[in-house]
């Protein structure tokens, strides 16, 4: 079999896996069949599909919503060519490596049979050449092993190894009875082809074990499929905070799950959505629609796919009352309309960026989905007007991997300043 025919066979096999994932595995996963196993399979085939998917998305925006036959054909065509080239390159490198190994073996045999007399020529001794070749081979194998280990860790381990973090935030004018209030923030769950409903159930159970006063849900509950909205909503309805749960929608809830459906299902499960509105926590720790004292928790719609109405969210809050704003996208903190509105915010809770999903020590996250780069990638940062806490989120988008950015359940403890 020629090198080209081998490469073509590898490319065709990869494309058959991609087709099987989209036509067979994805529908089964959406019907809650074998989600644990199929999630890994769909994630792996998505990585194989990235060259074609990227090309098709460039030609057909909003591919998550409209996976058309022409876009699918473009993706398969690009994938066929890409993996044909990649397989050809791999086979050639493999042959070169095998030739180097054979050459090293033959050289060792010649060296063992050579005279022990010291050579007076200036040429490189065979033993030195042998040592260099073996060093090169060992280095190549070590790098390959390290690369495969890192890839396996980022795909299999870290995405489902969440951590519980705690932030203590001082709030001016916070009533003494609300000092110590515990808000558990869950963001970017992204229940979908890569994240099973069992994973969501584990998150909910872990959250309930923390005995939160308030659960703040900051958007992106699904990824790539309207059929995932119902299951994730039913799981989130199992949350048991002492005071209540409050939520806003994210960009994927509109583009992938359908904002209208999500709103309806959240209402059915009695999970208040506070996009462009608010609720109040009274000094007696009751969640009410209106109050003259206590703490206001307001929300705005998604910056990318909805409307942010700062007046509707904050205009009628009593002037001295502390207020927290839920915004899926942290870039809201820099929006000119928000800055010019003059509304005071004491703390903003956001998600969206996932911490970049990949963090390189010394460099940060290569991609953050924020117009302000590393500033709003993760953690507690200071915006022009208020502190902003950005959760690293719990799910994944674009690529089903996390490296150096573990999923996060965030506990925000409020203290009177």
Image: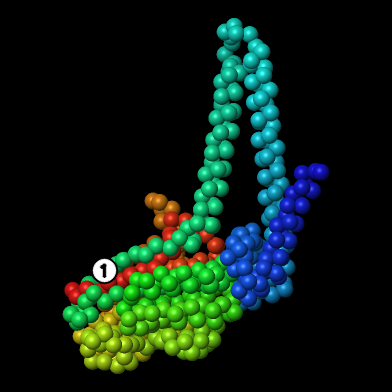
- Is residue 322 found left or right of 191 in the rendered image? left
On the question of residue 337 being in view, the answer is: no
- Is residue 54 found left or right of 12 in the rendered image? left
Instruction: Give the camera-side residue of 340 and 109.
Output: 109
Residue 306 higher or lower than 48, as above or below: below
**Residue at 67 percent of width and 45 percent of height:** 90
Position of the C terminus, as image quadrant, is: bottom left
Instruction: Give neighbour class at mark 1: few <14, some 14-19, many 20+ (Cα, 10 Å).
Output: few
On the question of residue 143 being in view, the answer is: yes
Task: Give the residue at the far top of this rendering.
Answer: 117
Figure label count: 1
Query: Within the image, what quadrant is residue 38 found in?
Result: bottom right
Task: Give the residue at the far right of this rendering.
Answer: 1
Query: Within the image, what quadrant is residue 40 found in?
Result: bottom right
Instruction: Give the camera-side residue of 2 and 35.
Output: 35
The image shows residue 230 at horizontal and vertical percentages of 54, 82
- Is residue 97 found left or right of 332 in the rendered image? right
**Residue at 56 percent of width and 24 percent of height:** 131
Instruction: Give the camera-side residue of 379 and 365.
Output: 379
**Residue at 40 percent of width and 65 percent of height:** 408
Q: How is the image coloured?
A: rainbow
**Label 1 belongs to which residue?**
168
The image shows residue 334 at horizontal and vertical percentages of 35, 73
Position of the N terminus, as image quadrant, is: top right
**Residue at 56 percent of width and 33 percent of height:** 138
- Is residue 361 found left or right of 261 in the rendered image? left
The image shows residue 23 at horizontal and vertical percentages of 71, 70
The image shows residue 270 at horizontal and vertical percentages of 44, 88
Residue 153 higher or lower than 250, as above or below: above
Q: At numbered mark 1, what does the secondary structure look like: helix, strand or loop?
A: strand
Query: Within the image, what quadrant is residue 29 found in?
Result: bottom right
């Amino acid at each position: 079999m020629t090198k080209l025919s081998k490469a073509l066979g590898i490319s065709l096999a990869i494309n058959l896996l991609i087709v099987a994932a989209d036509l067979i595995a994805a529908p089964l996963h959406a019907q809650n069949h074998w989600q644990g196993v199929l999630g890994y399979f769909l994630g792996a085939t998505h990585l194989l599909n990235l060259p074609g998917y990227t090309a098709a998305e460039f030609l057909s925006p909003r591919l998550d919503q409209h996976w058309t036959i022409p876009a699918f054909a473009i993706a398969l065509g690009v994938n066929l060519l890409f993996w044909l080239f990649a397989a050809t390159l791999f086979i050639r490198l493999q042959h070169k490596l095998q030739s180097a190994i054979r050459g090293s073996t033959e050289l060792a045999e010649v060296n063992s049979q050579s005279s022990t007399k010291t050579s007076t020529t200036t040429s490189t001794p065979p033993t030195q050449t042998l040592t260099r070749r073996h060093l090169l081979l060992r280095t190549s194998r070590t790098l390959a092993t390290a690369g495969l280990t890192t890839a396996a860790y980022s795909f299999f381990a870290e995405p489902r190894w969440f951590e519980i973090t705690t932030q203590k935030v001082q709030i001016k004018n916070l009533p003494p009875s609300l000092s110590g209030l515990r808000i558990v923030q869950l963001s970017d769950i992204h229940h979908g082809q890569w994240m099973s409903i069992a994973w969501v159930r584990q998150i909910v159970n872990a959250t309930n074990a923390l005995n939160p006063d308030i659960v703040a849900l900051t958007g992106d509950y699904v990824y790539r499929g309207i059929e995932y909205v119902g299951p994730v909503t039913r799981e989130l309805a199992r949350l048991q905070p002492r005071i209540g749960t409050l939520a806003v929608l994210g960009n994927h809830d509109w583009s992938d799950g359908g904002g209208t459906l999500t709103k309806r299902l959240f209402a059915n499960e009695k999970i208040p959505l506070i996009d462009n509105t608010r609720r109040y926590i009274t000094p007696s720790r009751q969640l009410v629609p209106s109050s003259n004292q206590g703490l206001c928790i307001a929300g705005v719609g998604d910056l990318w796919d909805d409307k942010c109405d700062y007046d509707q969210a904050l205009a009628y809050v009593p002037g001295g009352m502390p207020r927290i704003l839920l915004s899926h996208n942290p870039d809201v903190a820099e929006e000119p309309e928000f800055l010019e509105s003059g509304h005071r915010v004491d703390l903003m809770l956001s998600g969206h960026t996932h911490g970049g999903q990949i963090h390189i020590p010394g460099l940060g996250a290569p991609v953050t989905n924020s117009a302000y780069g590393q500033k709003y990638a993760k953690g507690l940062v200071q915006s022009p007007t208020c502190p902003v806490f950005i959760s690293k989120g719990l799910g994944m988008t674009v690529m089903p991997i996390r490296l150096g950015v573990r999923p996060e359940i965030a506990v925000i403890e409020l203290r009177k300043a």
